Image: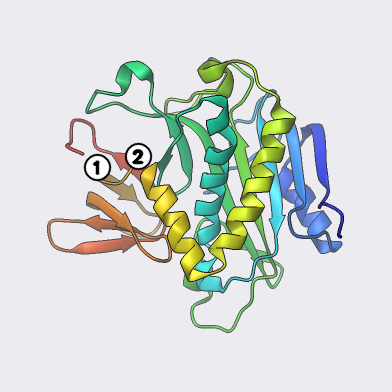
Amino acid sequence: MTDDPPVEFHESLGNTSLRVRQLADDGAPHGTMVVANELTAARGRTGNEWAAPPGGIWSSTLLRPDLSTEHVGRLTFAGAMAVVDAVEPLGVDARLKWPNDVVVASPSDEDAADAVPKKLAGILTEPVVDGVTVPGKPVDEVFGDDNVSVEYVLVGTGINADFDPAEVSLDRPVTTLRAEVGSVDRERVAERYRESLVARCAAAESDEGFAALLDDWRERAETLGSRVTVRRRGNADVTGIARDVSPRGGLLVETDERTVEVTEGETTRLRNAPR
């Protein structure tokens, strides 16, 4: 029987992903996790600064999955569902926003057609290929048809936990576990998240397992059925009805002309638009 992968807890850290990369390069096993109460040099999916004040569950987890470059994006869905698995037992009604956000609708807003869900958590999946980190885009789109292999994957996850949402200045509504259900045991939530992430990663390695994972994701999808605009880096925006997700995790958006598979971007639901 092997020992459980190590979990490091830090009071304050610059960036958990950098620490996990050090551990990975030293041969740390699949499932190794680093968690911090506060980050001083956090960044988001597009490289922008990311608020990570004291009281959060800011983590990065090392995964060594048996996945092709085309399918590494499956782990973003695994990470999102792992957050759901970690917070639902606390009484949080978590919903999922493509591609990488976990959100909560305010009770007073649930029946409002133009309600804007509040962000609870975000997931950043970073494959490392030939020593190069590939954040925010499918690996196969970056390297084309080149014969490359993924060395390992860093799944960074930020869960807004035990602080006042007003402490975070963002361009979107946010919430925290404390605001939803009161103070929580952050270490226990982190451990529950890691356990689920490792299990969800294993499921995502097979087509059948990922199909089941997508079914779980669809049940909690805030995005599907809504009229949205997806803003993409270096490409034209796509506006239409978010109909489904593809077998590799792309968002299928039905525009006035055709259905487009979008593999990266920032999704905004259009207010006052029918779901």
Q: Which quadrant would the N terminus be assigned to in this image?
A: bottom right
Front residue of 186 and 13: 186
> Which residue is drawn at the image coordinates 67% and 39% (left, top)?
192
**Image quadrant assignment for residue 225:** top left
Query: Measured along the vertical axis of the image, is residue 66 above or below residue 166?
Result: below
Is residue 49 among the parts visible in the rendering?
no
Front residue of 240 and 204: 204
Q: Which residue is mark 1?
A: 226
Query: Measured along the vertical axis of the image, is residue 69 above or below residue 173?
Result: below
> Which residue is drawn at the image coordinates 43% and 25% (left, top)?
173
Give the left or right position of residue 191, taking residue 116 as reference.
right
Q: Which residue is mark 2?
A: 222
Of all residues, the one furthest to the left in this rendering is: 256
> Which residue is drawn at the image coordinates 44% and 33% (left, top)?
103
Query: Measured along the vertical axis of the image, is residue 149 above or below residue 50?
Result: below
Does the residue at mark 2 contact the one at mark 1 (Cβ under 8 Å)?
yes
Give the left or right position of residue 89, taking residue 212 as reference.
right
